[in-house]
Amino acid sequence: MGRVLATLGQSRLSSNLNQLARAANTGSLPVSPDTEEALQAACPEVAALRAELLRALGSREAGAP
């Protein structure tokens, strides 16, 4: 579990998602229908990954988004 968390921390995933959200909110991200579909599809996958990690850590928040 420690290695998984370390790898995720080094991946800058949360930073990249934050940059995408900021760019979308400011209008500087060119969003085509395909891009929007891909981003929408990624959201539940990221939430599921978060829930699984919290569950593995024994967190009571595992079911919360």
Image (spheres, rainbow, N blue to C red):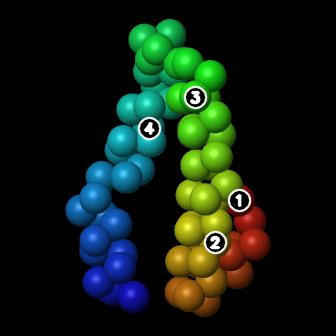
Seen as rendered, the residue at the extreme right is: 63
Q: Quadrant of the N terminus?
A: bottom left
Q: Position of residue 43 (x, y in %)?
A: 62, 48
In the rendered view, tell whether residue 60 sits above or below residue 26.
below
Crowding around mark 3 (Cα neighbors within 10 Å: few <14, some 14 to 19, many 20+) is: few
Q: Which residue is mark 4?
A: 18
Q: Position of residue 31 (x, y in %)?
A: 53, 19
Residue displayed at 29% across by 84% down: 3
Marks 2 and 1 close (CB-CB < 8 Å) = yes
Q: Which residue is mark 2?
A: 51
Seen as rendered, the residue at the extreme front is: 34
Q: CA distance from mark 3 to mark 4?
A: 20 Å
Q: Which residue is mark 3?
A: 34
Q: Position of residue 8 (x, y in %)?
A: 34, 66
Q: Position of residue 35 (x, y in %)?
A: 54, 29
Q: Which residue is mark 1?
A: 65
In the rendered view, tell whether residue 23 sits above or below residue 26.
below
* Image quadrant where residue 51 sits: bottom right
Residue type of the residue flagged with mark 3: Asp
Residue type of the residue flagged with mark 4: Asn
